């Protein structure tokens, strides 16, 4: 089943226009993924671009894969990048605890399936799925937690409470080393979940990847490798010296031309803000310095650059020397990151989630500035996993998924009660008592003509019937109260399934819950069912 994004709360107008009314935003995105001619022209243009560092890129990727034993398909995909006819379908994402929310996996699946689709369509070209690890973000509080359904189908937050969280700035979260608290966090997750025949296998998977002594990047990458390597996914980590050597020129230009780049961002954001929400704040410089385990933004200063909110000032020449000698100490911000990505990789298509679709109009002007091909954004697949026991409730109450998305828990309960003719128990008994009174009154009129004394007997019969009705009413009220409580409980379960904590399921719920309940093969089911060509939200029944 598919649902138009317009029928689901939470999506911004910019994304909705990008998907459904591209003519409204053509000046911001430039390339319409739905237009076949535009798509073909883009692929043709990309196929003619040279990537001078392909050999070096493949060497870097192979070096990063030394600790792993990749599948034959992944090896083939890596080696194919040596060819000028191979291009990447890129999915980029920040790290996440235990794999992050389901949307991360949907983005990867979208990249894999689109790569296959493009291979079939453009027979003389090759396309490979690449996952770009965004491990340099310093917002630990955004990646140290995940959410799961509980045994009772509630929603529970699971948080990695490392002693490091007391620090103000932890630097790149990908470099944080997991301590003994990760075992406690893993234990907490599985204590919340119902024990099943799959629990041991899934716990071994999580415990074997999120381990003491591993960095956040290593743990996240190993989990993705274990789950998606068979699909030929290439996982690329930019947060190393060798990849950043390839970006030195871009970093240097960003420093030298910071004023022009800042004005570019300000002008685009101002234009965008005339009609839409602006997702990103424009900063004077789109770079951070990784300094003493901290990730600090470069801020313009009369003597060069202030390093974050510290008192440290470095001149432009000093920053350029760091870029030249130690580029691993430089980190791009969210605006510059896609530019770096598409300068290093032979990108054909970028898979975009809701956030990317909303902020990419602010990024696109930088592509022409750096003489890079403007990317073609392709919306990632979007889905809600709907369990069979809840689907039965949906059918029982004659609901639609749209109503569950839109209505509050109370509104959903009221809707179910209103649609049930037997839910208003007091009204049923009131009507019945009224009908009995009416019938006895008519009987008394007829009996009075025969024998007036019989009317007294008729009144006693009435009183006796009403006493029995009162007893039945109390039983009915008790039964109805139980039914109402069940409806309230079911409404809560349905809201948790479709809008946990008021958000999309794919934004917060972790894959582990479904793997624990249905087995790791549920990933194959999702892979097969997930559509990348509908451009609507999908309901996948399990």
Image (cartoon, rainbow, N blue to C red):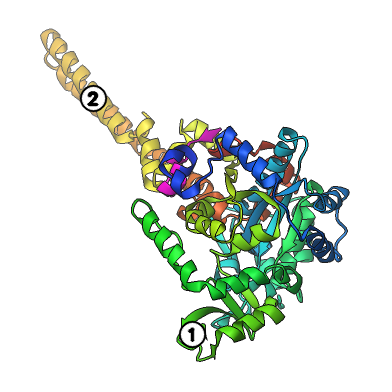
Give residue 315's position: percent from left, percent from top: 55, 87
Position of residue 236 in the picture relative to residue 441 (left or right): right
Is 10 magenta? The answer is yes
* Residue annotated with mark 2: 462
Query: Is 340 in front, or is 403?
Result: 340
* Residue annotated with mark 1: 309
Task: Check disc 1 and report its element: helix, strand or loop.
Answer: loop
Q: Which quadrant would residue 164 be assigned to in this image?
A: bottom right
Q: Which quadrant would residue 477 be assigned to in this image?
A: top left
Count the marks: 2
Q: Decide which of tag 1 and tag 2 comes sooner along the chain.
A: 1
Question: Of all residues shown, which one is farthest toward the bottom?
Answer: 311
The Cα atoms of the two marked residues, 1 and 2, are separated by 86 Å
Residue mark closest to the camera, 1 vs 2: 1
Give residue 389's position: percent from left, percent from top: 59, 39
Which residue corresponds to the image point at 79% horizontal and 49% vertical from the top-left?
Answer: 232
Q: Which quadrant would residue 467 be assigned to in this image?
A: top left
Query: Is 284 in front, or is 360?
Result: 284
Which residue corresponds to the image point at 58% horizontal and 61% vertical from the top-left?
Answer: 370
Quadrant (top left, top right, bottom left, bottom right) of the N terminus: top right
Tag on residue 217?
Answer: none
Query: Is 450 in front, or is 7?
Result: 7
Give residue 464's position: percent from left, percent from top: 27, 28
Query: Is 464 in front, or is 490?
Result: 490
Quadrant (top left, top right, bottom left, bottom right) of the C terminus: top right
Is 418 magenta? The answer is no
Position of residue 434 in the picture relative to residue 78 (left or right): left
Which residue corresponds to the image point at 29% horizontal and 35% vertical from the top-left?
Answer: 426
Q: Is residue 474 visible?
A: yes
Q: Is residue 388 visible?
A: no
Give residue 47's position: percent from left, percent from top: 71, 45
The span picked out in magenta is 1-17
């Amino acid at each position: 089943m598919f649902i138009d994004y317009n029928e689901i709360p939470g999506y911004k107008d910019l994304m909705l226009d990008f998907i459904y009314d591209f003519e409204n935003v053509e000046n911001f995105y430039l390339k319409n993924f739905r237009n076949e001619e535009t798509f073909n022209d883009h692929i043709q243009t990309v196929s003619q671009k040279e990537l001078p560092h392909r050999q070096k890129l493949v060497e870097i990727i192979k070096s990063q894969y030394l600790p792993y034993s990749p599948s034959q398909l992944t090896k083939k995909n890596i080696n194919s990048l040596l060819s000028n006819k191979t291009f990447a379908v890129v999915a980029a994402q920040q790290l996440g605890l235990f794999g992050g929310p389901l949307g991360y996996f949907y983005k990867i699946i979208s990249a894999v399936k689109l790569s296959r689709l493009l291979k079939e369509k453009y027979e003389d070209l090759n396309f490979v799925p690449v996952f770009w690890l965004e491990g340099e973000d310093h917002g630990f509080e955004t990646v140290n937690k995940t959410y799961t359904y509980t045994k009772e189908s509630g929603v529970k937050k699971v948080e990695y409470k490392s002693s490091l969280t007391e620090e103000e700035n932890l630097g790149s979260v990908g470099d944080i080393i997991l301590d003994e608290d990760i075992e406690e966090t893993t234990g907490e997750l599985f204590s919340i979940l119902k024990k099943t025949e799959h629990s041991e296998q899934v716990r071994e998977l999580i415990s074997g990847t999120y381990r003491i002594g591993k960095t956040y990047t290593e743990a996240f990458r190993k989990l993705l490798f274990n789950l998606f390597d068979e699909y030929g996914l290439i996982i690329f980590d930019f947060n190393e010296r060798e990849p950043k050597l390839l970006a030195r020129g871009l970093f240097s230009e960003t420093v030298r031309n910071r004023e022009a780049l800042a004005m570019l961002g300000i002008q685009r954001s101002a234009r965008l803000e005339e009609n839409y929400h602006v997702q990103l704040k424009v900063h004077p410089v789109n770079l951070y310095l990784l300094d003493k385990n901290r990730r600090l933004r470069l801020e313009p200063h009369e003597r060069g650059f202030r390093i974050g909110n510290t008192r440290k000032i470095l001149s432009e020449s000093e920053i350029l020397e760091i870029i030249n000698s130690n580029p691993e100490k430089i980190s791009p911000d969210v605006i510059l990151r896609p530019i770096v990505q598409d300068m290093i990789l032979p990108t054909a298509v970028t898979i975009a989630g809701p956030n990317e679709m909303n902020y990419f109009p602010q990024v696109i002007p930088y592509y022409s500035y750096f003489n890079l091909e403007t990317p073609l954004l392709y919306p990632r697949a979007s889905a809600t996993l709907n369990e069979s026991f809840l689907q039965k409730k949906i059918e029982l109450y004659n609901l639609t998924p749209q109503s569950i998305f839109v209505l509050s828990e109370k509104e959903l309960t009221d809707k179910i009660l209103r649609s049930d003719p037997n839910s208003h128990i007091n009204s049923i008994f009131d009507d019945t008592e009224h009908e009995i009174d009416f019938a006895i009154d008519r009987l008394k009129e007829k009996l009075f003509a025969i024998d007036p004394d019989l009317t007294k007997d008729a009144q006693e019969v009435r009183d006796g019937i009403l006493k029995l009705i009162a007893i039945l009413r109390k039983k009915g009220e008790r039964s109805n109260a139980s039914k109402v409580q069940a409806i309230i409980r079911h409404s809560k379960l349905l809201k948790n399934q479709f809008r946990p904590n008021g958000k999309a399921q794919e934004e917060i719920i972790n894959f582990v819950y479904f793997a624990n309940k249905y087995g790791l093969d549920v990933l194959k089911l999702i892979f097969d069912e997930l559509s990348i060509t509908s451009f609507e939200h999908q309901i996948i029944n399990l």
